[in-house]
Amino acid sequence: MRSKILQLLPAVFLAIGLLLASFVHLHFINQIPGKHGLRSINSDLLPRWVGIRAAFRGEDPYSPAVLRNIQTAFYGRPLTLADRGVDIQGFWYPAYAAVILSPFALLPWSAAPLAFLVVVPLLFIVALRLCIGAFESSRKVAWIATLSITVSWPVMWALRLQQPTVLTAAFVFLAYFLIVRGHDIAAGLLLVASMIKPQLVAPLILWLLLWAVLQRRYRLLASFLCAMTALLIPTEILIPNWFPHWIHSVAGYAENTGSALPLIAAAGRIAGLVATTILVSLSASVLWRLRSSNPQSPQFGFAFSLLLATALCVTPTNLGMTYNQMLLAPAAVLLFWWKPARNNARLVRRGMIGVFAWVFVAVLVSFAGDMLRPSNLWIKLPFENLLLPVAATVALLVQYWDALQTTSSVHRDEYVAAPA
C-alpha cells in the first residue's frame, strides 16, 4: 500500500502545481475590466438562480422582465443598445432545469455558490473515477487520470464560473458506470437529470435509447421515459406553455453569445458546415455499427466517448465555453490507452496526446507569462482550443478504422481496440 501511494506522489505534486497555476491565472482573469466598463458577477449559476426563483413566484423565466432582473443581478444594471457585444445572460435552459437545479435556487445567493462549490466538485470526482474505472483500467491509472482531468483547465474554468456543465458531466459519467454495472433504473434517472444541457447529451441519450431497445434493456428505457414524464408534469404546472418560450429564447442564442460550431468558427460558414456534416456522418456510421455493443465491452465505452466528442462538434461554442470540453474526458482516456497497429494511426495518437497535453501546458505557460509580464496573450492562451472536440472525434474515428484493418472481417463490426 505504501509503495502504491509513493508511486502516486509525482502525479499529486504535478496536480497541485497545475491547480496553483490555474488559481493564479484565474486571479489575473478576474482583474480584466468588462466591456463598456461593466463589472459582472461571473457566475453562470446566477442567471439560472434568478430565473428559477422567478419561476417559483409564477413568472416566466424567459420574459423580458426576468431578463432585466438577471442582467441587473449579473451586471448591476439592465443592458441597453449601447452594450452591444456583451453577453445578455438570459435564462437559456429548458424549463425543467428549474426542478433539477431547485436545491441551489432555494438557497439565498450568499449560500448557493458555496453549496455548488462544495457538492458539485465532489460529485464530479466520484463520477469521473467510477466512469474511468469502468474502462477496466488499473486503480493507479484510474486515479492518475481522474486527478489530471479534475485539475485540467476546462474543469477549473467551469468551477470558477459555477457552470452547470459540471453537473451534466457528472450525471452522464455516473450513468455510464451504472449501465455497465446493470443498474438501469438509476442510470435512466441520471440521464434525465443530465438533460439540463440537452445540446451536450441528446446524441448520447438517443443512441442509448436505441441501444436499450436492441439489447432489451427495457428498465433503462422505462426509467428514462417515466422520469422525463414525471419531470415535465411539474414543469408545465410551474411554467405553463414553456416550450415555445424556450425555443424562442434560444433562437438567437448563438448570436447573443457570439458562439458558433467549432469548424464554422475555424473555417467559415460554408466550409465549416460541410466539414461538420462529413464528420457527423462518419461518426453516425460507426455508431450505427456499434448499436448492439455489450455494455461490458470496450466497444460500448468507445461509443460513449465518440458520442460525447461528436456532440461537442455540433454545439455552438466560443472561447469562454471551453468548460464543455470536460466531456472529452472519456475520449482522452481511451486515446491514451490506445495501441495503434499502423504507422499513420500511431502518428495520430501521438498528435492527439500532444493536443491534450497542451491543455495543461497552456496553463503553465500562461502562469509564467502572468508572473513575468501580464498581457492579453497569456489571458487567452488556455482558451485557444476550440478545435479540440474535432481533433478528438477524428482521432477516435482513426482508432476505429485502425482496428477494422487489423481484425478479421468476421469481427470487424464488433471490434474496437481495448485499453491496455
Image (cartoon, helix red, strand yellow):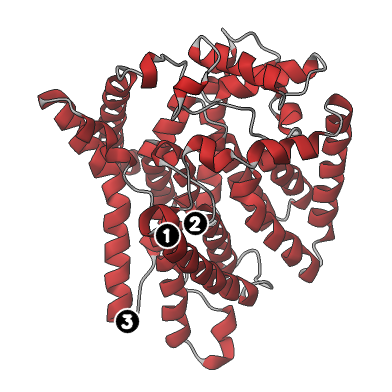
**Distance of label 2 from label 1 (alpha carbons):** 6 Å
Observer-nearest residue: 375 or 348? Answer: 375
Which corner quadrant holds the C terminus? bottom left
Circle 2: element type: helix
The residue at which mark 1 appears reads as 390
Instruction: Identify the mark nearer the N-term, 3 or 1.
Output: 3
Q: Nearer the viewer, mark 2 or mark 3?
A: 2
Contact check, label 2 and label 1, Cβ < 8 Å: yes
On screen, 400 above or below 172?
A: below
Q: Which numbered circle lies on residue 342?
A: 3
**Distance of label 2 from label 3 (alpha carbons):** 26 Å
**Image side of residue 375 versus residue 346, left or right:** left
Observer-nearest residue: 173 or 240? Answer: 240
Residue sitting at x 87%, y 42%: 229
Residue sitting at x 40%, y 42%: 149
Say which quarter of the image contains residue 401: bottom left
Picture coordinates of residue 411 (x, y %)? 57, 86
- Residue kind at label 2, given as amino acid type: Cys
